[in-house]
């Protein structure tokens, strides 16, 4: 049974029984929250006297007292229910003799609920270990580098090299024979630790003793990068929480000094329940300098940044992207920039709806962290002379009818990816060609951004949501759903074996008869390459672009393969 599936804490005999079965997992802990994080993942948790150095800033473990061990032991016990609790005997609490050791060990177990104690020493501690175990106190031994004897050992040196290996082997055998249920081997040559492990009938727990031991333990503050005064060679850092905490403190300071914190969502109104709803305006960032001040602090904290690039005039489709980003990322940036480089008509650019404050209000309940609304100078500064062009994918469909459009898209999206430092970017599948272009651009330029396509959001009548829909007349809005209906009928016919040569002419005429003025394309294409297809084989999608009421509407849907109805 795995450690994570365990429903109750093991006992010392359970740990002993793991000898030769599977590796034993253990860490130190000193506080309730940290213990709760490792509960069940670790077979046992040790309240080590290392707390003196990593928690109290002491120069060694020697000044640690019984009271300190009890206090931290009680805290750790409150966080554990599925991992066994072991607690260190501090320096001076057991060396005098077995009777002194019993009194202090009994106190530790009674006042903390620990299942066992750990003490340092080899042959010289065998009598004490025997005395304790015969009186109901399980003992975990500790040989090799014993930090409480650091002044005798002459520093934190590797133990058991050369001829000293025989003495260490004797120590390990002595504590096992005396009744210890497990033995920690610290800073011991890996080959010697291997021999010791083979020679003992109890588990060995290594810390700087190679991989052949029956289990491993590390000081949790070392493993998580919280203790940074020095790093032992045997430590592998699985996180850099010290750096992240420092960055978080710095970010907090920046927010307080800039009066970004507390915001309305962190404040109270005079009348209960009357806290004004945030307008979203407080999240608007207009300059690249201000945006980077935010993203630098987030990245220093190791937070994942998601971006939703938009041109504003937000509708439920955009908001669904923001919600998806909010669910998956630590920080979310929504960008609003009406990009002149992706418009072919000056009139179309001028007519594009701009609703910045309304957009901010819509985003407020979602809890985005920044709304980046740059002006042209932030995206295309004076002298800007670069263009990102993705060939092949942009030669068909919208690209064939809107020359240069996708160059503008790829260029601005590449800029926004770098400006926001995003690791995840969210786009709607309604603009399927755009989604494929952005994915190809990110791949070709080695941009470390995961481009995620989210489902198309539609009105109740089936019309795909678009910012341009609000430009339709009332009559046009009633006619527009015909595009989706015709496409769904075409898709069904294609799934039943029809060909585009048979189906497309009638579909085009149906749209024209229904009130559409021009059909730019009505094509079946392979989903990734966008190569034309005559029949629905493999992953295919149907694409359409048509003019109605002077407004260009686009849509697409899966016909066969991934995303198609089963």
Image: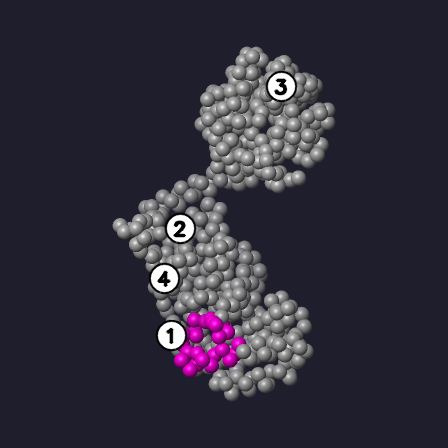
Label 2 sits on residue: 293
Tag in front: 4 or 2: 4
Say above or below: 451 vs 246: below
| SS at mark 1 in the image | helix
Give the camera-side residue of 200 and 256: 200
Tag in front: 3 or 4: 3
Q: Which residues are magenta?
A: 459-484
| SS at mark 4 in the image | helix
Instruction: Give residue 133's mark.
Output: 3
Instruction: Give residue 444's mark.
Output: none
Say above or below: 59 vs 259: above
Could you tell which of marks 1 and 4 lies nearer the N-terminus? 1
Label 4 sits on residue: 361
Instruction: Locate the C terminus and report the quarter of the image it occupies.
Output: bottom right
Say above or below: 116 vs 413: above
| 2 and 1 marks in contact (CB < 8 Å) | no
Instruction: Give residue 350's mark.
Output: 1
Give the camera-side residue of 15 and 380: 15
């Amino acid at each position: 049974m795995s450690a994570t599936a365990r429903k109750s804490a093991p006992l010392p005999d359970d740990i002993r029984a793991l000898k030769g079965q599977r590796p034993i997992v253990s860490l130190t802990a000193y506080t309730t929250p940290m213990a709760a994080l490792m509960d069940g993942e670790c077979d046992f948790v040790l309240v080590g006297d290392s707390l003196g150095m990593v928690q109290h800033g002491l120069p060694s473990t020697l000044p640690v007292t019984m009271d300190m061990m009890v206090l931290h032991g009680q805290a750790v016990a409150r966080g554990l229910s599925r991992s066994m609790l072991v607690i260190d005997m501090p320096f001076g609490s057991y060396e005098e003799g077995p009777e002194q050791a019993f009194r202090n060990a009994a106190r530790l177990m009674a006042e903390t609920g620990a299942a066992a104690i750990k003490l340092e020493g080899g042959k010289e501690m065998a009598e004490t270990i025997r005395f304790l175990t015969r009186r109901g106190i399980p003992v975990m031994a500790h040989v090799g580098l014993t930090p409480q004897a650091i002044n005798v050992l002459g520093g934190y040196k590797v133990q058991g090299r050369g001829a000293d290996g025989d003495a260490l082997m004797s120590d390990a055998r002595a504590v096992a024979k005396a009744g210890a249920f497990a033995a920690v081997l610290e800073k011991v040559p890996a080959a010697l630790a291997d021999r010791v492990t083979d020679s003992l009938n109890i588990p060995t727990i290594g810390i700087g003793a190679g991989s052949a031991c029956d289990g491993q333990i590390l000081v949790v503050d070392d493993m998580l990068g919280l203790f940074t005064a020095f790093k032992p060679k045997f430590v592998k850092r699985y996180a850099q929480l010290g750096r992240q905490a420092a960055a978080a403190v710095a970010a907090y300071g920046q927010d307080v000094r800039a009066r970004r914190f507390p915001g309305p969502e962190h404040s109270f109104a005079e009348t209960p329940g009357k806290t004004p709803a945030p307008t979203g305006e407080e999240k608007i960032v207009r300059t690249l300098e201000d945006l980077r001040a935010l993203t630098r602090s987030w990245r220093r904290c190791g937070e994942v940044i998601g971006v939703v690039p938009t041109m504003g005039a937000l509708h439920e489709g955009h908001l669904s992207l923001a919600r998806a980003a909010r669910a998956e990322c630590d920080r979310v940036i929504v960008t609003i920039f009406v990009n002149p480089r992706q418009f072919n008509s000056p009139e179309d650019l001028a007519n594009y709806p701009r609703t910045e404050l309304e957009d901010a209000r819509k985003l407020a309940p979602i809890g985005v962290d920044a709304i980046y609304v740059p002006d042209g100078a932030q995206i295309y500064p004076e002298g800007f002379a670069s263009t990102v062009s993705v060939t092949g994918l942009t030669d068909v469909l919208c690209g064939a009818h809107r020359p240069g459009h996708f160059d503008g898209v790829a260029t601005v999206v590449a800029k926004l990816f770098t400006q926001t430092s995003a690791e995840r970017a969210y786009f709607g599948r309604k603009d399927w060609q755009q989604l494929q272009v952005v994915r190809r651009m990110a791949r070709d330029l080695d941009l470390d951004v995961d481009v995620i396509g989210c489902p198309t959001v539609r009105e109740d009548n089936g019309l795909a949501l678009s910012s341009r829909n609000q430009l339709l007349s009332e009559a046009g809005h009633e006619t527009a759903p015909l595009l989706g209906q015709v496409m769904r009928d075409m898709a069904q016919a294609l799934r039943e074996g029809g060909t585009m040569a048979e189906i497309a002419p009638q579909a085009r005429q149906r749209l024209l008869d229904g009130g559409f003025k021009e059909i730019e394309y009505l094509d079946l294409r392979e989903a990734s390459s966008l190569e034309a297809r005559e029949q629905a084989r493999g992953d295919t999608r149907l694409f359409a672009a048509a003019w109605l009421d002077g407004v260009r509407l686009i849509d697409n849907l899966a016909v066969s393969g991934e995303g198609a109805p089963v």
